[in-house]
Image (tube, grey):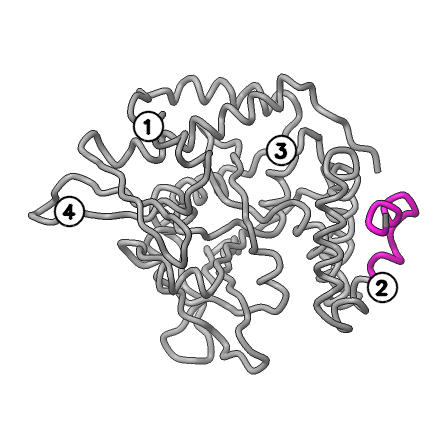
């Protein structure tokens, strides 16, 4: 598997696009918006308060204080409609060989972003997230590893309960803004649904972290106004998610797992799938591609994530040992240092 590094100018354009999307997202709260800083557990968080609507002032969660968020808040004061400029950047990045989602996935991600799903710290996981890593890391990724026909959205259960904000409407209504044909797929528990489908089989699944060994079939994500399927190992994947730009229209700002954690998580999940599952091979292909990209730019962070996973117990180590034994020697060497 050979990865091609992209020119530095392409990587710079990606960073510029993400900066513009951050500022644009904040500017959309309106000219009369003001920013509020609050502390929880000794850590500062920021909210935006919009102008009065029907006698009420609306506050929305922006996120924990970071240099990037502070810069975006400052840029939002002066940014003016620059969608055409962002479209030019997106076209240039696509022409350079970076992957883009299919049109329906792009529209769904746009709708989720506009509703505030990613601002509320939900993340895209699975192959759609993998598609975004080429732009983040500055490499073209193997085409066979980026094909998908569904979309997975995940949010940490604790974050969903703690964040002082929520979607204004049910999650299914957000999806229907992109495609009215979406319908919820009911669970055994009446009235619960953590998956949504279109008549032709396109799927959006909502996932969350497992809280105990005997999880219920679903958990309620208050912030996202939907039920979700709890999965083991997901807490590892969703720790310290990062922002990424999806190359659709004038760009869509989303959150994805840190690429180091995604690579290690895919190693684990590849051993949890049945041997007949075709996703098993794709898991390893995606992990291998990211390991090779990270080996050049951030091998120490990759080894830290790998060591953290191995430190979580014998079951984790067994799954990782099996998966790593299937990797080429150079990829194994990167993980084991």
Q: Which residue is mark 2?
A: 322
**Dot 1 crowding, Cα within 10 Å, few <14, some 14–19, many 20+:** many
**Quarter of the image with the N terminus in it:** top right
Residues at badges 3 and 4 in contact (C-beta under 8 Å)? no
Q: Main secondary structure of the magenta part?
A: helix
Dot label at residue 57 = 4
| For marks 3 and 4 on the same chain, the one whose residue lies earlier in the sequence | 4
Question: Marks 4 and 1, how far apart in space?
Answer: 20 Å
Residues at badges 4 and 1 in contact (C-beta under 8 Å)? no
Give the image location of residue 132, x and y in percent.
Answer: 59, 38
- Decide if residue 50 is on the left or right side of residue 268: left
Dot label at residue 99 = 3
Give the image location of residue 65, x and y in percent.
Answer: 41, 43
Q: Nearer the viewer, mark 2 or mark 4?
A: 4
Instruction: Locate residue 289: give its quadrant.
Output: top right
- Residue visible at 22% across and 43% down? 49
- Residue visible at 62% across and 24% down? 11
């Amino acid at each position: 598997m050979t990865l091609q590094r992209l020119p530095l100018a392409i990587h710079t354009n990606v960073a510029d696009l993400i900066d513009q999307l951050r500022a644009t997202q904040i500017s959309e709260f309106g000219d009369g918006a003001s920013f509020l800083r609050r502390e929880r557990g000794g850590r500062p968080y920021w909210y935006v308060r919009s102008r009065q609507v029907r006698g009420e002032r609306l506050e929305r969660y922006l996120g924990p204080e970071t240099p990037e968020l502070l810069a975006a808040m400052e840029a939002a004061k002066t940014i003016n409609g620059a969608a055409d400029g962002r479209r030019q950047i997106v076209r240039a990045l696509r022409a350079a060989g970076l992957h883009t989602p299919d049109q329906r996935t792009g529209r769904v991600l746009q709708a989720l972003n506009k509703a505030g799903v990613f601002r509320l710290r939900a993340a895209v996981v699975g192959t759609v997230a993998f598609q975004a890593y080429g732009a983040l890391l500055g490499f073209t990724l193997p085409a066979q590893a980026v094909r998908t026909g569904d979309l997975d959205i995940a949010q940490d259960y604790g974050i969903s309960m703690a964040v002082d904000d929520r979607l204004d409407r049910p999650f299914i209504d957000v999806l229907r803004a992109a495609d009215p044909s979406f319908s919820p797929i009911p669970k055994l528990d009446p009235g619960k649904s953590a998956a949504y489908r279109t008549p032709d089989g396109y799927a959006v699944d909502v996932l969350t972290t497992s809280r105990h060994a005997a999880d219920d079939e679903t958990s309620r994500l208050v912030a996202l106004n939907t039920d979700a399927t709890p999965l083991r190992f997901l807490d590892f994947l969703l720790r310290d998610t990062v922002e990424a730009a999806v190359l659709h229209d004038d760009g869509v700002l989303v959150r994805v797992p840190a690429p180091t954690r995604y690579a290690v998580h895919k190693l684990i999940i590849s051993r949890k799938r049945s041997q007949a599952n075709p996703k098993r091979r794709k898991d390893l292909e995606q992990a291998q591609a990211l390991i090779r990209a990270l080996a050049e730019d951030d091998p120490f962070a990759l080894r830290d994530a790998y060591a953290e996973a191995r430190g979580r117990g014998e079951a984790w180590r067994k799954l990782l040992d099996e998966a790593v034994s299937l990797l080429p020697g150079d990829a194994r060497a990167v993980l084991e240092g």
